Amino acid sequence: MEWYALLIIPIVMVIAVVLRTINFKPVVIPEMRKRHEIDEKKVVESLSKMIQFKTISNLDSSLVNQAEFKAFRTFLKEHYPLINERAEYSEHEAGVLFHIKGESEEFPTVFMSHYDVVPVMDGWQEDPFSGRINLDTVYGRGALDTKSSLNAVMESVEFALSNGKNFKNDLYMAFSGDEEIYGPSAPAIVNYFKKKGIKPYMVLDEGGAIVSNMFPGVKNKVAVIGIAEKGFMNLKLTAVSQGGHASTPPKNTPITDLSKAVIKLNNHPSFRLKLTSPVKSLFDTIAPYSKSFGIKLLFANLWLFTPVVKLIAKLSGGEFLSMFKTTQAFTLASGSDAINVLPSSASFGINYRLRPGETSDQIVKKVTKIIKNPNINVEVIVSCEASTVSLIDDAYRMIEKAIKRTWTDVIPSPYLMVATSDSRHYHEICEHVYKFSPMDVSKKDLGKIHGFDEDISIENIINGTNFYLNLIDQL
Ligand SMILES: [Zn+2]
């Protein structure tokens, strides 16, 4: 064999890489923009009213004002005459369920949302529950998370019914009243579905949104639709003391034992990066839009460059990195009550967010192995596995179509949600669970969620309602 025969493999590889890059083009299915003749003033005022109910959830149930929750549910029953005339209404824990019968019950759709909000801290510029309508915004807790999507669901369905809409399939509207505290209403509704043998064809809940600067070299805004979400686990490490006095301390105390364990866990490379299918779907969808040849070359050839992409993820950190791995955050530390007293026991709390494919069991085993200290007790306080991955097929295409009819210049894309939502409970009974909040949000908006001075633009309120109507058109 001649020496230059050795060059054949690298040359073929280079040609393959370049060809794949050149052919790496976005799949564009154009859609005509469609607006509906909704009464915009009514839609905006309805959200304002919803915000005025102080439906603040709290883990301590004695601090929850049940009357506000009840008043909100009454509002839903009185404010939407057509829905209430047509739908069967039921309550499940703090959750409410409306069921509108379609021509067939075979392929039901579920529109989800939640009407509870997180508490407000001092520092708001105005009354957080004023629901004040300004020139171009509506102000108050829950404006973004997520009375806006609840309002958009109710307003769009009411409007569709007023136009004589007949649903081909059953439609459910399921709103929980304790999403923010991982409460029981969404599981109760799922149990109700199971008992009745109802298998939703498609579920849509809050989740991704329309975001800017999503991907290097892509100018368009991207509408990210969650097709899976990470799991979570709270772990408590506890070490106990052999006793002793702070004036004559032993070499090892619960605090030193735990500190060593934390350092070991923090430095361990064991939480490997993995390119899971929802993240790969995201890259496959948006990377072809990149104006950067280098970026396209990388992402068109993940068969070769996945290690490079993982390295970039490691270097960039943040949400980009968390899509690849199970993350570990040390959150809670407790020991002795006074500086001059040795603790009889000490503990550390760790919050894990589990990537698809890595289970809480595997993590507990890993943690125990890494810290390698029989004096430290490892205890799972709460855990929930990563969801399954929803299919990208006809149901997904309906959401995509509704997005493109509402915002013509955005790129819809599947992605992995790193936060949790109530819709995680639906994965076991449905293969098409999607997580998308129909609004265009800036970084500043995202900071207002669970923060101060939450408000939503009137444009988002109107577009959100049009989005659901564009989806309802297909149901
Ligand atoms: Zn929410």
Image (spheres, grey):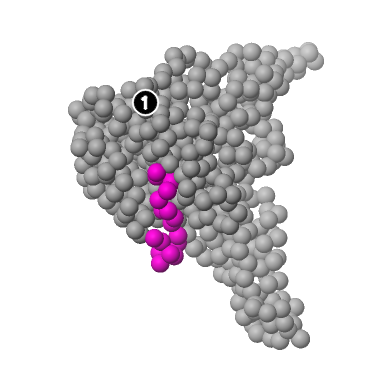
User: Whole-percent x and y of residue 9?
Assistant: 70, 18
Q: Is residue 375 magenta?
A: no
User: Whole-percent x and y of residue 294?
Assistant: 71, 22
Residue drawn at 64 percent across, 17 percent down: 21
Residue drawn at 32 percent across, 52 percent down: 71
- Please name the amino acid that badge 1 sits on: Ile
Q: Is residue 376 visible?
A: no
Residue drawn at 29 percent across, 32 percent down: 158
Q: Quadrant of the N terminus?
A: top right
Residue drawn at 71 percent across, 76 percent down: 252
Q: Nearer the viewer, residue 282 or 208?
A: 208
Crowd rating for badge 1 (residues with CA inside 10 Å; few <14, some 14–19, many 20+): some
User: Whole-percent x and y of residue 338?
Assistant: 68, 79
Q: Which residue is mark 1?
A: 38
User: Whole-percent x and y of residue 326?
Assistant: 58, 48
Q: Is residue 225 above or below residue 9?
A: below
User: Seen in the image, is 165 located left or right of residue 299?
Assistant: left
Q: Is residue 304 above or below residue 429?
A: above
Q: Quadrant of residue 475?
A: top left
Q: Is residue 411 visible?
A: yes
Q: Nearer the viewer, residue 457 or 118?
A: 457
Beta carbon of the mark 1 residue lies under 8 A of ligand 1: no
The secondary element bearing badge 1 is classed as loop
User: Seen in the image, is 347 located left or right of residue 3?
Assistant: left
Q: Which residues are magenta?
A: 49-65
User: Seen in the image, is 272 located left or right of residue 38?
Assistant: right
Q: Nearer the viewer, residue 134 or 372?
A: 134
Circle count: 1
Q: Is residue 54 magenta?
A: yes
Q: Nearer the viewer, residue 217 or 437?
A: 437
Q: Quadrant of residue 319?
A: top right
Q: Quadrant of residue 324?
A: top right
